[in-house]
Image: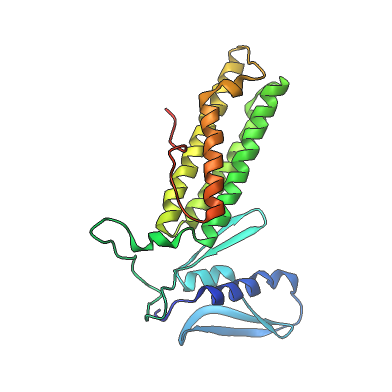
Amino acid sequence: MCGKLFTASSIAVISLMASSLALSQQSVTGKNTLIINGQYTRVPVIDVNGHSYVGLEALADAIHGSISRSGQTVALSVPIDHGDRGSSVNSSPAPVHESGQNTASSQGFSRGFLTAGIEQMSSLREWHTALSTAIQSGMPLSTTLLDPYRAQAATNLRLVSLSATTPSDRSAYQLLDNEFQNMTKLSEKYLKLRANLSYISPDALEKDDLNQNIIACGHSLGAMAASGQFTDDGTCGLSR
């Protein structure tokens, strides 16, 4: 299927309409067919109380986009419209110049990636808080305590990966993955100490270089999210 790509504003309107479907399931008057830029699609359109709605999954498939979910957030990532240049839905990747830099590098973070990335940063912070609270208070450390946080962070990291569409997204994903791996190492380190019945000082994390690196990386990731642009200051490297 060919045709011009959606602009960001049209996608926002369609996404808002689709997300509202769950709010009103009565007075369904019929199903119609969605035409995108003159091209027929298999996306069903349902009329509810005089308004038209489409399913996000079907819409994403029609425009070769992707959907990621995290908690109450649903992120729809779509091909980027570089102006009115007759681009097709099956658009090819942005060209790479001799410098090796993708021309899309100036795009910064996509909206879907930024949403998923912030959610992942939140899950990493909760995981770190659970670990530090247990150590500072002298609570027994166990996989039962920490594994749910790790599992949530792993799930969110997968959603981040699925949301990455621009070069900046993919570069930032690597740093988020590094932060996840470092948090895994930090947790396993203290779980092992606990299993060996080693004494863990309440201020152990304050003296732990890996922990300090994780904190510094968190600050760096937060600054990137605020600016919407990728920058690597070296604080989010994978610890050995």
Residue 154 x, y percent position in the rendering: 55, 42
Numbered marks: total: 0
Front-lying residue, 49 or 129: 129
Is the image coloured rainbow, by chain, by secondary structure, or in one colour? rainbow
- Which quadrant would residue 234 be assigned to in this image? top left
The residue shown at (65%, 28%) is: 132
- Which quadrant would residue 149 be assigned to in this image? top right
Front-lying residue, 111 or 187: 111
Quarter of the rendering occupied by the N terminus: bottom left
Front-lying residue, 171 or 4: 171
Residue 142 x, y percent position in the rendering: 65, 25
The residue shown at (75%, 74%) is: 24
Q: In the image, is 126 to the left or to the right of 183?
A: right
Q: In the image, is 106 to the left or to the right of 226?
A: left
Quarter of the rendering occupied by the C terminus: top left
Residue at the limit of the structure toward the bottom, as seen here:
38
The residue shown at (55%, 22%) is: 208
| Above or below, comparing residue 213 to residue 79 in the picture | above
The residue shown at (54%, 61%) is: 111
| Above or below, comparing residue 48 to residue 208 in the picture | below
Front-lying residue, 116 or 36: 116
Residue at the limit of the structure toward the left, as seen here:
98
Residue 51 x, y percent position in the rendering: 69, 83
